[in-house]
């Protein structure tokens, strides 16, 4: 490729020989061009697994798309991509071009990319080294034909490791984090680390979501506080970040995930549906981020 001529990382055949992907000007132009067409970048993360990151990410993406916004949903959980299942897109494969991929459409307004689409067997364990993951996430942003988006929602694996780091670095300082926690103390400690991690990378936290907070009772429709709740709100206060709200533990959420019907689409009138709506509404009214240089 002529782009690489003159680059110290150019290989003899003219391509890029860098193990971490090209970090030189031409490709960054490509990244900047892609990012310039995406208005808001929201990265869903948590210090803990199983707290509902993917569920929250999928519901944010679907709710925004149903509100008429153009949305991309990127699943960068290379070890356990769950977005294809949550949106009934398992077995779909993205169309491939020469050096571009088309995201898989969920609807006219929502396009999805997940490593799950590229794995032949989703039970196969994936072992990636840090640099490979870094390159992969950058590719998932710049080589996917996202087009003009109002929102790109990214679903991260748990922790403060390579994927969230690489995601924030790739998307740049205007990307904002939505951090998900459960009310319990163990999760809170890990999530506190996530909040400071976001600050250390140089990004802002859009807000904290307390998921599985109380139990939405299918018998009476009320939310019973069977365990402690409020830990997320306390943590938000302590860390000085916005508390977006709490979502009860609701058998209907688990069922909708298993069946691949996003909860916000099927059940917006329940207490849980209202709770999700309250969390997502502020995202519909974000001020435009400053234009990147
Ligand atoms: N509010 C909730 N009520 C009931 N089940 C939930 C809720 N949020 C998530 N779940 C379920 O918990 C499990 C883990 O959720 P998931 O979104 O995959 O978490 P993570 O991405 O953080 O690992 C899934 O089976 C999901 O359906
Ligand atoms: Mg997940
Ligand atoms: Zn009840």
Image (cartoon, helix red, strand yellow):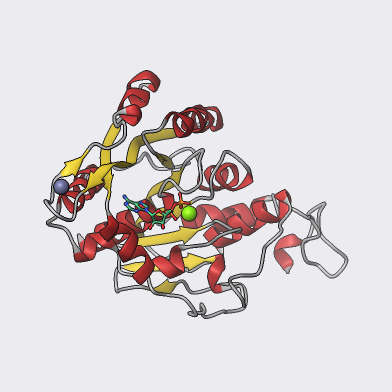
> Can residue 219 be seen in this snapshot?
yes
Whole-percent x, y for residue 85 in the image: 43, 69
Q: Nearer the viewer, residue 17 or 293?
A: 17
Where 118 sits versus 290, above or below?
below
Q: Residue at x 34, y 67 (%)?
A: 110
Which residue is drawn at the image coordinates 67% and 62% (left, top)? 126
The quadrant in which residue 231 appears is top left
The N terminus: image quadrant: bottom right
In this orientation, which residue lies closer to the viewer: 96 or 217?
A: 217
| Farthest-out residue, top | 238
Find residue 275 and report its horizontal and vertical position in percent.
Answer: 20, 46
Residue 114, given in percent of the width and then of the height, sits at 51, 65
Lateral position of residue 219 relative to residue 137, left or right: left
Q: Position of residue 170 (x, y in %)?
A: 56, 48
Q: Nearer the viewer, residue 214 or 236?
A: 214
Q: Is residue 92 left or right of residue 243?
A: right
What residue is drawn where x is 35% and y is 36%?
206
Q: Relative to 258, say whether 132 is above or below.
A: above
Q: Quadrant of residue 234?
A: top left
Image label count: 0
| Residue 69 visible in the displayed image | no
């Amino acid at each position: 490729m002529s782009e690489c001529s003159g680059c110290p990382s150019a290989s003899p055949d003219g391509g890029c020989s860098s193990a971490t992907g090209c970090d030189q000007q031409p490709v960054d132009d490509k990244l900047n061009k892609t990012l310039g067409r995406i208005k808001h970048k929201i990265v869903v993360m948590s210090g803990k697994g199983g707290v509902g990151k993917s569920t929250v990410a999928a519901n944010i993406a679907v709710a925004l798309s149903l509100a008429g916004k153009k949305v991309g949903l990127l699943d960068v959980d290379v070890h356990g991509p769950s977005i294809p299942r949550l949106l009934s897109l398992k077995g779909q494969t993205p169309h491939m071009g020469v050096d571009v991929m088309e995201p898989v459409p969920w609807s006219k307004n929502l396009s999805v990319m997940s490593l799950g689409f590229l794995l032949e067997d989703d039970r196969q364990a994936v072992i990636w080294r840090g640099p490979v993951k870094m390159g992969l996430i950058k590719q998932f942003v710049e080589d996917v034909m996202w087009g003009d988006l109002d929102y790109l929602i990214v679903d991260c694996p748990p922790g403060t490791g390579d994927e969230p780091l690489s995601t924030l670095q790739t998307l740049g300082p205007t990307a904002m984090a939505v951090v998900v926690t459960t009310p319990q103390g163990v999760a809170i400690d890990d999530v506190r680390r996530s909040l400071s991690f976001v600050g250390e990378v140089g990004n802002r936290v859009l807000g904290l979501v307390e998921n599985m907070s109380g139990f939405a009772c299918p018998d009476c429709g009320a939310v019973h506080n069977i365990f402690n709740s409020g830990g997320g709100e306390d943590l938000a206060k302590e860390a000085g970040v916005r508390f977006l709200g709490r979502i009860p533990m609701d058998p209907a959420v688990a069922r909708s995930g298993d069946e691949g019907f996003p909860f916000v689409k099927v059940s917006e009138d329940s207490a849980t549906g209202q709770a999700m709506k309250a969390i997502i509404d502020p995202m519909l009214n974000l001020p435009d981020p400053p234009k990147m240089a």
